[in-house]
């Protein structure tokens, strides 16, 4: 009985020891995680992968869809052509549509050639610098010496670990600022400045510019979200954006022609130039047309997309403007009856 009790006590001792050590390890792990969590702040997320090189794709997206997309307006061009059709100038409208299709394509190709010339010029400048330094033979000799240098460096890495830890604070102070944080700060400051400018501007034209700038981001965001529905054969997202902008521009434009009040006129005009103008884009429309056109593989989906967009934009512009005119004439006809 005594030996059995000793074995039982020994088993209980080992179990309690293992449990205590496991609990201690878990506690240390939890305390380590909590210490790391205390160091994390809300601003740390803005510094992860936010260097200009890491965010180059996002910057190009903002410049291409945001700035260049909002700089050109498909709805304004379509409204001008619809206005010519309503006046009976069919020939002028046809010429306007043809020039509106050809000139953006020429400008886009011209921009591509300029970018290619700049790239080749920079490559030649770098090659000239290397030639002045002795050509590429120095590069080859340096590459041959890299193996020997690596062996020497690997032997001294352990001696420099402490120095590396000491210089972490200095390196952190020289880090590239976060592009996301800078862009967010600029956007917030611009938004606040535009809202505050409404209280300081006195002329209607200044109010219209400020309101147009406030409406523009919503049009750009809507166009960016709808672009996910683009198909390689037919970009339905961009197609819907252009048609919605044409419908909005035609209907609101006819409401403005009905002589509303000064405040309503400023608001409606700002909605057309801001939201509808940035919702549609001739630049993105041109890119989609060229992307779907390739004579080498006999691909002409881009021209089908261009014809459908121009045709339905013209039809929707005529229907929206005619619908508003019909609605304005109904009260007058009822009064005469």
Image (tube, helix red, strand yellow):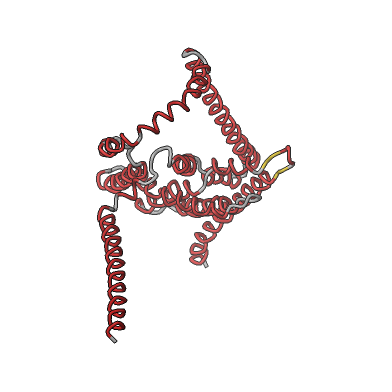
302 left or right, relative to 112: right
Q: Is residue 147 visible?
A: yes
Give me the residue at 54% from left, 40% from top. Answer: 283
Residue nearer the viewer, 8 or 25? 8
From the top left corner, tell me how far across and down residue 163 is, in percent. Answer: 27, 35
From the top left corner, tell me how far across and down residue 82 is, in percent. Answer: 58, 46
215 left or right, relative to 92: left
Q: Is residue 93 above or below residue 315?
A: above
Q: Is residue 110 above or below residue 27?
A: above
From the top left corner, tell me how far across and down residue 329 is, in percent. Answer: 52, 60
Give me the residue at 66% from left, 46% from top. Answer: 307
From the top left corner, tell me how far across and down residue 319 is, in percent. Answer: 58, 56
Residue nearer the viewer, 179 or 70? 179
Q: Is residue 78 above or below residue 136?
A: below
Q: Is residue 321 visible?
A: no
Residue nearer the viewer, 147 or 94? 147
Residue nearer the viewer, 7 or 101? 7
């Amino acid at each position: 009985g005594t030996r059995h009790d000793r074995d039982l006590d020994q088993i209980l001792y080992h179990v309690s020891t293992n449990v205590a050590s496991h609990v201690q390890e878990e506690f240390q792990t939890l305390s380590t995680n909590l210490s790391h969590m205390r160091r994390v702040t809300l601003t740390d997320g803005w510094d992860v992968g936010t260097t200009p090189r890491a965010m180059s794709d996002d910057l190009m997206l903002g410049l291409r869809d945001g700035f260049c997309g909002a700089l050109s307006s498909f709805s304004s061009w379509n409204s001008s052509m619809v206005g010519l059709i309503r006046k009976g100038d069919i020939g002028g409208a046809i010429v306007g549509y043809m020039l509106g299709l050809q000139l953006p394509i020429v400008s886009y190709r011209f921009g591509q050639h300029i970018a290619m010339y700049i790239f080749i010029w920079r490559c030649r400048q770098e090659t000239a610098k290397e030639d002045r330094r002795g050509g590429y033979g120095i590069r080859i000799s340096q590459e041959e010496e890299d193996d020997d240098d690596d062996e020497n460096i690997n032997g001294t890495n352990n001696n420099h670990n402490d120095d590396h830890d000491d210089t972490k604070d200095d390196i952190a102070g020289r880090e590239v600022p976060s592009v996301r944080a800078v862009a967010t700060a600029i956007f917030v400051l611009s938004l606040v400045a535009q809202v505050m400018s409404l209280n300081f501007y006195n002329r209607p034209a200044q109010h219209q510019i400020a309101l147009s700038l406030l409406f523009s981001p919503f049009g750009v965001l809507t166009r960016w979200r709808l672009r996910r529905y683009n198909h390689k054969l037919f970009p339905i997202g961009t197609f819907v954006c252009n048609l919605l902008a044409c419908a909005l521009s035609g209907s609101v434009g006819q409401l403005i022609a009905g002589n509303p009040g000064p405040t309503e006129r400023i608001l409606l005009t700002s909605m057309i130039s801001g939201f509808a103008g940035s919702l549609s884009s001739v630049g993105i429309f041109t890119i989609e047309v060229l992307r779907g056109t390739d004579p080498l593989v006999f691909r002409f989906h881009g021209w089908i997309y261009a014809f459908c967009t121009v045709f339905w934009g013209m039809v929707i512009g005529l229907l929206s403007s005619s619908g508003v005119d019909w609605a304005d004439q109904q009260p007058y006809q009822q009064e005469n009856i």
